[in-house]
Amino acid sequence: MIERGQTAADTAEPITSGKRSNLVDLVKGLAILLVVYGHTAQGVAHRGWWTGPGMAFSEDFIYSFHMPAFFFVSGLFVLGSIRRRGASNYTLEKFKTILYPYLLFAVITAALGPLTRRFQVTYSPFHWKAFLLNVADGSVSWFLFTLFFCLLLALLTARLPNWLRFLLAVVAGVSPVYGSYIIDRVLREFCFVAAGMWVGNHIFMLERLEKTKAALGLVLLGGFQVVTIYFYGYVGRWNYILMGLTGTAALFLLARLLEKHRVGDALGWLGRASLATFLLSAFAQGATRVVLSNVFHTNNLWLQLLLPTAFAAALPAIVWYQQDRWRLGWLFHWPF
């Protein structure tokens, strides 16, 4: 971690030097909290406990930028990582830290299916063919699968000028694609990775931005996001790219406002454990929902919305920070 008073700009390569800024962790914390909330809200809506325009707007607003923010952050240090590790070691690392947990949790989720089926809104019996097809096309967990191929595409385009890579990514992202589900997702999300690669370590210049200016920028971008989503939504390739970029920028401005604050420290703590939260949150979320419904016999909207979100964010993070003590590191990265 960077010491208080030291900026990431003071280190030429934060990712290679072992030092990092809390700013990126804060954004990851905000984004993963929105991911967990979005999944919880969907579960509440599917059970008929939350209906109406408020639910629809909430979902559209969150989904317009929370996943693009992760792809953007993933691109920030790609070029430095490639330079440091080399192409082969970079690729191997992505196999161990992204593709491996994707495959592992596909197996775990399938194995636990018969035990959790009675708590699910819908359940499909296990079939090997369907399982293997879902794993192969990324349907099991689209984010990790898509991220893996986006980062390989980043490797293939590493020698291009940043502006050209981003331009080509946008063109590919808005063009109609006649191919598989995963090809379409990779081409749609890669523009955010390319944007992150273009910004790179310059993102830490934000640490010097006055908080009053950050607040003004947040109000302007946030207002733009709300108005655009309300009238146009984020459906459509151009809208998705625009809303993803403006929403991500707003998250960084919000992170700047929360730096060196207790709330910011908590969000940074969540952000550093975002992989564990992404992989394990569904189990914590489902368990909390079952306890509320079957033990306390309540389907109160706010309880069913807020408590599963809180536990699904915090419990996986605790597992992440205790992975060495509990010998659970194999859940998140290749153990050999």
Image: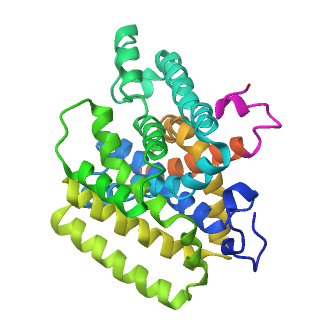
In this view, 98 is above or below 12 = above
Highlighted magenta segment, given as a residue range = 321-335
Location of residue 191 with respect to 10 vertically, above or below:
above
Q: Where is residue 164 in the image (x, y as percent from the top left)?
A: 35, 59
Q: What residue is at 60 percent from the left and 68 percent from the top? A: 23
Which residue is drawn at the image coordinates 41% and 28% (left, top)?
140
| Side (left or right) of 279 relative to 60 | right
Quarter holding the N terminus is bottom right
Q: Is residue 122 left or right of residue 252?
A: left
Q: How many labels does the image show?
A: 0
When asked about the image quadrant of residue 299, the answer is: top left
Front position in the image: 247 or 298: 247
**Colour convention:** rainbow
Q: Which residue is drawn at 58% across and 39% down?
A: 87
Residue at horizontal 51%, vertical 91%? 212
Q: In which quarter of the image is the C terminus?
A: top right
Image coords of residue 54 (percent x, y): 27, 61
Please identify the dominant SS of the magenta region. loop
Q: In which quarter of the image is residue 85?
A: top right
Is residue 20 rendered magenta in the image?
A: no
In-image side of 104 versus 134 (left or right): right
Q: In this view, does 6 lie above or below 71?
A: below
